[in-house]
Image: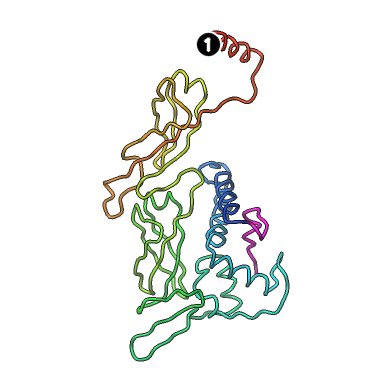
Amino acid sequence: MNFTDYYKELELDKGASEADIKKAFRRLARQYHPDANPDDPTAEERFKRISEAYEVLSDPQKRAKYDTLSQQRGFPGRGGGSFQFNQEDVGDMFQGTSFGDLLSQLFGQGTGNREQGTGNRRRRTGNDGRRTTDDGRIFSVTLTLEEAFTGVTKRLAMGDRKLDVTFKPGVIHGHRMKIPVGVLEVSIAPHARFTREGNDVRITEHVPLTTALLGGEHSVHTLSGKVTVKIPEGTKNGKTMRLRGMGMPVYEEPTKRGDMFVVLHVDVPTQLTEEQRALVEQLRNLGL
């Protein structure tokens, strides 16, 4: 059986802080994002593994259970010890991850929940403290920001069933939807470049010093491609530009869009050629 070491995927030690985990994800996601590696067929698979690792390690409950199970089972890179957990202890916490597939092999197929109650109404509770609805379990899925932007249909394995589930454009983090086997909770993975703020998105764009001083055109990334914006003459570092209607679609109202906020970071060169230094000194002598 293959064990996925999520700490290794994010190039972290087991004692990494939440901030370390987030920083590592953003760095690696930026490095391996498929859009940044169009000629590398392995980048997409690595990006998926990085996203899965972040999904587990960024959730305190999932991380604690993952660490405990890993250590007591004696998986590669973890301490040994007797194995004391069963499927009821895990529930559907890792549903849809490679670690969840491994646990299914270890424990065998099961409901993953303990059932309580009598009569026709049942309330099932897992050890993670989350209760299911009366008509089924709670499953989880993680989408990329691009998938939340465009909408996507995914075939998901849920217990012993596979379902095609459609997510509408603009779906938000934490959204729950009813499915034939229960309830599906949506998580949106952090993006390496964009930050989502409701229906708006924010991005930091680096502009050359000369463009900030003299003004000019600059290409900006958006979720639907690149657009050209005009940088005003004398732009200061940290200036924020608003691109109306370039944000996320409004859920259930896809014709409406949020805005995009572009924070401009003026790049100051750390090294100059002799010619560049001479020109800058001339500007200084002219009072600039």
Among all residues in the image, which is located at the extreme front?
Answer: 287
Q: Residue at x 40, y 76 (%)?
A: 132
Badge 1 crowding class, 10 Å Cα cut-off, few under 14, some 14 to 19, many 20 or more, is few
Q: Nearer the viewer, residue 74 or 4?
A: 74
| Place of residue 3 in the rendered image (x, y in percent of width and height, measured from the top left) | 64, 66
Q: Residue at x 46, y 59 (%)?
A: 142
Among all residues in the image, which is located at the extreme right?
Answer: 80
- 211 is higher (above) or lower (below) than 180: above
Q: Residue at x 37, y 76 (%)?
A: 133
- 24 is higher (above) or lower (below) than 166: above
Image quarter (top left, top right, bottom left or bottom right) of the N terminus: bottom right
For label 1, the residue is 287
Q: Residue at x 68, y 57 (%)?
A: 13
| Place of residue 69 in the rendered image (x, y in percent of width and height, measured from the top left) | 63, 72
| Place of residue 182 in the rendered image (x, y in percent of width and height, measured from the top left) | 38, 74
Q: How is the image coloured?
A: rainbow
| Place of residue 274 in the rendered image (x, y in percent of width and height, measured from the top left) | 66, 14
Q: Is residue 5 magenta?
A: yes
Q: Which residues are magenta?
A: 1-16
The secondary structure that dominates the magenta segment is loop
Tally of numbered discs: 1
User: In which quarter of the view is residue 40 placed?
Assistant: top right
User: In which quarter of the view is residue 125 placed?
Assistant: bottom left
Amino acid type at image mark 1: Gly
Q: Is residue 53 magenta?
A: no
Among all residues in the image, which is located at the extreme bottom?
Answer: 119
Tag 1 secondary structure: loop
- 241 is higher (above) or lower (below) than 62: above
